[in-house]
Amino acid sequence: MNHRTHPVKRAFVKVLGGRRTQSVAIPIFCIVLSLLAAAIVLLCLGKNPLQAYAGLLQGSGLFPKDSYAAHRSILTDFISMVDNWTPMLFAALAVAIANKGGLFNIGVSGQMLAAGFTATVLIGYSDLPAVVAKPLVFVIGIVAGALVGALIGFLKQRFNINEVVSSIMINYIIQYIVSFFIYTYYVDPISRQSRAVGANARLTLQQVSIGDLNTVLPIGFVLAVVCVFVLRFLMNRTKFGFELKAVGANKRAARYAGIPVGSRIVLSMTISGALGGLAGVTYYLGYYASIQPRTLADMGFDSIAVALLGNSNPVGIFFSSFLITAISKGSTYMSSTVGVQQEIASLITGIILLFSACSAFIRYLVEKYRVQLEEADKAMAEGGKA
């Protein structure tokens, strides 16, 4: 077996297997693959992929449109995208902190809904002044989401109930309870959604003037960016972060080393739930101003792929969540400019999310090929000595 036996594997490992560059190279590789796959779909429909991708960028405010309505510009489109990016960033961070502890938080959508509904009922319909109402919305979102996350962690720690099963069941419980109360007490007879929250409690300021432009202003985005760096510090620079990663890597070894595995499981899910709650209030009392009954936010599930694409690293998630949000936000405009149905635009977004979720598998292949090549090189060296 010589060094020429596996040229493709060697090139694969050389490009994607660098210890320092792997966290960046693999997500970029996944993105390129997804764009190529989406381009094939578009070509089969007789559409120009470059034109379609330009439409994505234009719809998300990353590329100028041919014309704009009054008081609108590329800046207003971009800020609108940032408004949608904010809850996605919180949601992906929620998934990441659970992943680090070896847990899979598929209940982010339920945590979002619980936090959004609680804050809506308690603050969104109140007459509190904005300087009091808006901070309280954040606080209630953190508490409500943390309680749901803590329940999932407790069930895992105390009864060894798989967190995927419990979080899915809790998702449905929250969904139907919220739907019951909306239809019974808080429904808007016209939209058939919950009544809109007051401007005093909304976390996205409306009709903000910037020069001659009218735009929105997501005040939760600053907190989301702060959370990125706080979580990075927590994971990489604190005892808790070390213990959390040790529990995620091997629970038995962590327990043998004296780490309180049970409390770390509950605490990681509590923090994850709190971040999911922040995603909920910035989504339901920010980007939107009401709640659609019987519906869990797709964002809570999309955030799983976003976290995987960002390698569960807070800084990586900052960029991966930006990318996925820009694609999702721009898909509607792409549909209108290129002339494809909205379902096709959603399909393309789904393809990109699907390939994004494959980053863990590609990382596994890289390590597998690395071991195979090292063994082949070792065997060749021993054969040469013989």
Image: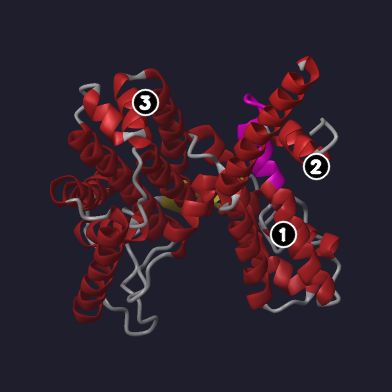
Q: Earlier in the sequence, mark 3 or mark 1?
A: 1
Q: Residue at x 40, y 31 (%)?
A: 231
Q: Secondary structure at mark 2?
A: helix
Work out whether residue 57 can be spotted: no
Q: Residue furthest top?
A: 385
Mark linked to residue 17: none
Work out whether residue 197 can be spotted: yes
Mark linked to residue 234: 3
Under mark 3, the amino acid is Leu
Place of residue 131 in the rendered image (x, y in percent of width and height, measured from the top left): 29, 42
Q: Earlier in the sequence, mark 3 or mark 2?
A: 2
The reply to whether the magenta stretch includes residue 22 is yes
Left or right: where 335 falls relative to 218: right
Find residue 115 and report its image quarter: bottom left
Left or right: where 155 falls relative to 79: left
| Nearest the eye: 179 or 131 | 179
Place of residue 24 in the rendered image (x, y in percent of width and height, measured from the top left): 65, 35
On screen, 117 above or below 184? above
Per the rendered image, the range of residues in magenta is 18-29
Mark 2 closeness class: few <14, some 14–19, many ≥20 residues within 10 Å: few
Where is mark 1, residue-wise? 56
Judged by depth in the image, the label closer to the viewer, 3 or 2, is 2
On screen, 127 above or below 238? below
CB under 8 Å between discs 3 and 2: no
Under mark 2, the amino acid is Val
Where is mark 2, residue-wise? 8
Q: Residue at x 73, y 53 (%)?
A: 33
Place of residue 35 in the rendered image (x, y in percent of width and height, measured from the top left): 74, 57
Q: Residue at x 31, y 53 (%)?
A: 201
Judged by depth in the image, the label closer to the viewer, 2 or 1, is 2
